[in-house]
Image: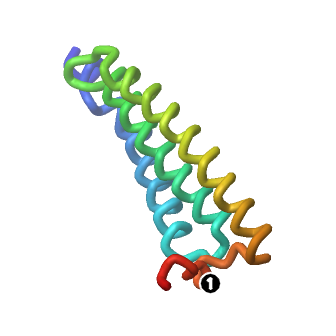
Amino acid sequence: MSEASGSGLATPYLTLAAILFCIGLYGALSKKNALIVLLSIELMLNAVNLNLVAFSKLGIVPNLTGQIFSLFSISVAAAEVSVGIAILITYYRNRGTTDVNEMNSLKR
């Protein structure tokens, strides 16, 4: 009975979420293209959502709290991507590049 409602069933989901988060973290820290960095951040947020849903459904005390937080996180991620893409398109039109290393116009 404890295995059916415990975190033993959540282990594959948590492992997948950890792998997705690590891939996203690697992409966000190592890539130079701003679009790839935004996609990597989105991958990290999806890993967090997977953790929230896994703990919500298969945790010690299953309830809807994790799923509700996941919906809020998806909403925030959608807003973040739309604003980020708009800023990136504007920057590309003005500067002609999406290289993260060359984005230093606010330093002056």
The residue under the point 27% across, 19% down is 5
| 54 vs 28: above or below | above
Residue 84 occupies which quadrant of the picture? bottom right
| 70 vs 79: above or below | above
| Residue nearest the observer in this picture, 98 or 10 | 98
Query: Which quadrant of the rendered structure holds the N terminus?
Result: top left
| Labels in figure, total | 1
Q: Residue furthest front?
A: 108
| 37 vs 31: above or below | above
Estimate the x, y position of residue 74 in percent, counting from the top left: 51, 33
How is the protein colored in the picture? rainbow
The residue under the point 58% across, 83% down is 101
| 57 vs 13: above or below | above
Disc 1 marks which residue? 102
Q: Image check: 37 left or right of 93?
A: left
| Residue nearest the observer in this picture, 62 or 42 | 42
The residue under the point 46% across, 64% down is 25
Estimate the x, y position of residue 53 in percent, counting from the top left: 40, 28
Mark 1, Cα crowd under 10 Å, few <14 / some 14-19 / many 20+, is few
Residue 30 occupies which quadrant of the picture? bottom right
Query: Mark 1: which secondary structure?
Result: helix
